Image (tube, rainbow, N blue to C red):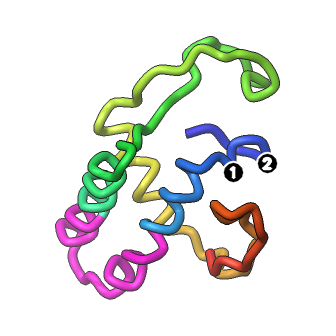
């Protein structure tokens, strides 16, 4: 769940953003908070049921630069994962960013 260039290109974070971006139109169209939460929980379930299964991790070492070192990572609580997904859904960046595909090539992903 960290931020910054180092973790942005991790395969699991790329997968998470792809899944979240696929659901974002439904999230935006949802009128009620309960619907938005349900969509976000669906994103969590899809990440966790993918192959290989995804996890939402947090740095528990206390280091602000753990991505540069071997930080201590632990699985985030369901509430923390939900908070992360809801934050991603609220983002209004809408720009294009270059991502690395599994083949090693770069392609644009609308974020």
Residue at position x 25%, y 53% in the image: 45
Residue occupying the far front of the picture: 103
The x and y percentages for residue 65 are 79, 24
Instruction: Give 96 or 12, whichever is nearer the viewer.
Output: 12
The x and y percentages for residue 93 are 66, 75
Alpha carbons under labels 1 and 2: distance apart: 5 Å
Secondary structure category for the residue under label 2: helix
Secondary structure category for the residue under label 1: helix
Residue at position x 36%, y 49% in the image: 51
Q: How many marks?
A: 2
Secondary structure, magenta segment, majority class: helix
Which residue in the protein does label 1 denote? 8
The dot on residue 25 is: none
Instruction: Examine the structure image and report whether residue 24 is included in the region drawn in magenta.
Output: yes
Residue at position x 72%, y 66% in the image: 99
Magenta region: 20-39
Which residue in the protein does label 2 denote? 5
Instruction: Examine the structure image and report whether residue 79 is included in the region drawn in magenta.
Output: no
The x and y percentages for residue 75 are 40, 26
Instruction: Give 96 or 54, whichever is nearer the viewer.
Output: 54
Tags 1 and 2 in contact by the CB under 8 Å rule? Answer: yes
Position of 77 relative to 23 (above/below): above
Instruction: Give 99 or 32, whichever is nearer the viewer.
Output: 99
Quadrant of the image occupied by residue 41: bottom left
Instruction: Give 35 or 75, whichever is nearer the viewer.
Output: 75
Q: Residues within 10 Å of mark 2 (few under 14, many from 20)?
A: few
Residue at position x 77%, y 69% in the image: 105
């Amino acid at each position: 769940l960290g931020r910054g260039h180092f973790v942005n290109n991790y395969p699991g974070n790329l997968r998470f953003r792809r899944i979240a971006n696929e659901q974002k139109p439904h999230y935006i169209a949802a009128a009620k908070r309960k619907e938005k939460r349900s969509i976000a929980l669906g994103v969590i379930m899809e990440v966790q049921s993918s192959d290989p299964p995804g996890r939402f991790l947090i740095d528990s070492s206390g280091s602000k630069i753990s991505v540069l070192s071997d930080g201590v990572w632990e699985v985030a609580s369901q509430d923390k994962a939900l908070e992360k997904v809801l934050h991603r859904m609220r983002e209004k960046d809408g720009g294009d960013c270059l991502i690395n595909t599994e083949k090693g090539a770069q392609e644009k992903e609308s974020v």
